[in-house]
Image (spheres, grey):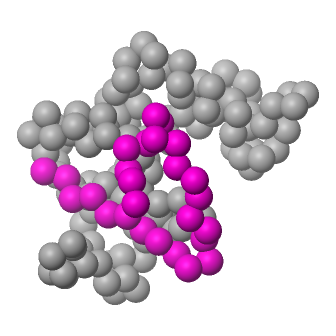
Amino acid sequence: MMMVCGFKGTGKDTFYGNYSKNYYSVYSINSRCLLLEPSYVRVGFADNVKKEVNDIYDLSNPNKDDIIFENTTYRDLLITHAKNKKKEDINYWVKKSYDWKKRNNVMITDFRFLHEYEYLVKLGHEPVTIRLFRSEVTIQQIYLKDLWIIF
């Protein structure tokens, strides 16, 4: 199991789509090359957030910066909905995204929070975490209360 994180526009889903074609070399902290097998299944925690918001508001996958209501973007709706569900159960989106009893060869393309990692470890998985960087993407300011990944 791999958990991929990176800033918006870094290419997390592109990484998943191309990793089996040897477009990427991935090295661990101890400089060992990480072998990537082509049999991984993509899982995105945010996929169900989008599905639920689209169903509630009868939307058809607008761009995240599209204004849906006065001064409210699609991104705003996604964030609000996701936070409300996490208040009910911190692991709501992790649980909803995949049957974690099935198999380990999963690549999560939108890993952001420590509780996501901890939940999967608690289930007996041994995830490898990957942080992607891209020179064209500016490193953004991180709010420590929301994210656990620190540079």
User: In the rendered view of the protein, which quadrant contains the N terminus?
Assistant: bottom left
Tell whether 91 sits left or right of 147. left
Q: Where is residue 76 in the image (x, y as percent from the top left)?
A: 70, 33
Q: In terms of secondary structure, what is the magenta stretch mainly? A: loop
Q: In which quarter of the image is residue 30?
A: bottom left
Residue 88 drawn above or below residue 39: above
The residues colored magenta run 126-151
Q: Decide which of 74, 132 is in the foreground and name it.
A: 132
Tell whether 79 sits left or right of 127. right
Residue 10 drawn above or below residue 96: below
Residue 62 appears in view: yes
Q: Decide which of 97, 116 is in the foreground and name it.
A: 116
Residue 14 appears in view: no
The residue drawn where x is 47% and y is 71% is 133
Is residue 133 a member of the stretch shown in magenta?
yes
Q: Where is residue 141 in the image (x, y as percent from the top left)?
A: 57, 53
Q: Where is residue 26 in the image (x, y as percent from the top left)?
A: 29, 78
The residue drawn where x is 61% and y is 68% is 138
Q: Position of residue 5 (x, y in %)?
A: 41, 57
Q: Decide which of 53, 7 is in the foreground and name it.
A: 7
Residue 145 drawn above or below residue 22: above
Q: Quadrant of residue 113?
A: top left
The residue drawn where x is 25% and y is 78% is 27
